[in-house]
Image (spheres, rainbow, N blue to C red):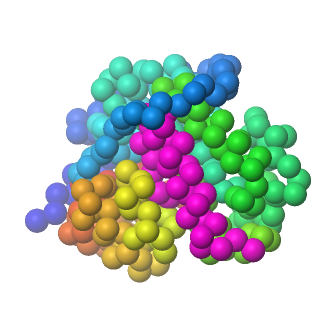
Amino acid sequence: MLNWKPLLCLVPALPLLGACGGSEAASLSGEPVDTVTPAVEATATWWRPTPGTRWQIQLDGTLNTSFNVAVYDVDLFDTPASTLSALKAQGRKVICYFSAGSYENWRSDAGSFPAAALGNTLDGWPGERWLDIRNTKVRDIMRTRIELARQKGCDAVDPDNVDGYANSTGFKLTSADQLSFNRFLAAEAHARGLAVGLKNDVGQVAQLVNDFDFQVNEECFQYDECEELLPFINAGKPVFNIEYGGNSLAQQICPRANALNFDTLVKNLDLDAPRLSCR
């Protein structure tokens, strides 16, 4: 029988149970980080998570570090190195999120992008535009972001919007363009001793599973795409799945997610602290 106790770990709507962790506070003060790119190491090693890894993702609001999880997925720019250090001191691994395939006009490096590399607006996301991932300067910026993740102490990166070829970007991106860019991201992360997740890009999972260490998926149940993610599970790599909704959705999908050996969270769309964990 499914254990629904993890589903009660909802913050702040419900009080935390013992299984949800303590109440450690995290500093959210900003701090400068050197972004000079050093020579990469050809023999770097990195963290390799496995299915069954308890995790939390929070990209909005004051970071809640009290959950009893092994992994936190947090924003690369908004989370100071001191917070990452505090999480790691508690024995946690930290995945650092950034958008690799889109321009966000609020980021500190927004002025570095060439105008020619800025494409169509992402539907529903003001201030965000698709990038021409073939552009050399775009790759340089992403390399610098991955180096920032290394310097801040991240264990892994979660590059988002890496399926532009399947969207209306304003550029004639091909499947081959996307494979090249995504493999570039994976290679740059691994060269710096960082694990890397494939964010969505369901159509290229079979081709990229050997290049990436885990999958971060949004709404495979909603879009009936979960079976396409099984190459990660078959390779002993986790699928960190997110579905958007509440308690009723969790009760509907959690038995299916657990049967697939996915690590599924039900979250709010803005990815703030509240979470419902399927296991």
Question: Which secondary structure type mostly characterizes the magenta part of the structure?
Answer: helix
Confirm whether the magenta stretch covers residue 126.
no
Judge left or right: residue 261 versus residue 80. Answer: left
Q: Find residue 251 and report its image quarter.
A: bottom left
Q: What span is colored magenta in the figure?
A: 172-199
Which quarter of the figure is the N terminus placed in?
A: bottom left
* Residue 191, x across and y down, in percent: 48, 37
Residue situated in front as seen by the camera: 245 or 257? 257
Question: Is residue 176 magenta-colored?
Answer: yes
User: Furthest-bottom residue in view?
Assistant: 224
The residue shown at (67%, 26%) is 35
**Residue at position x 26%, y 60% in the image:** 235
Numbered-mark total? 0
Spot occupied by residue 158 in the image (x, y as percentages of width and height): 51, 48
Q: Is residue 126 left or right of residue 145?
A: right
Residue drawn at the location 43% of the way across and 68% of the way down: 207
- Residue 133 horizontal side relative to residue 222, left or right: right
Q: Horizontal and vertical percent for residue 199?
A: 50, 58
Residue 145 lies, with reference to residue 208, above or below; the image says above
As displayed, is residue 175 above or below residue 140? below
How far across and down, in percent of the image, does residue 198 sit?
Answer: 47, 57
- Left or right of residue 253, residue 183 in this image: right
Q: Is residue 191 above or below residue 9?
A: above
Quadrant in which residue 70 is drawn: top left
Say whether residue 118 is visible.
yes
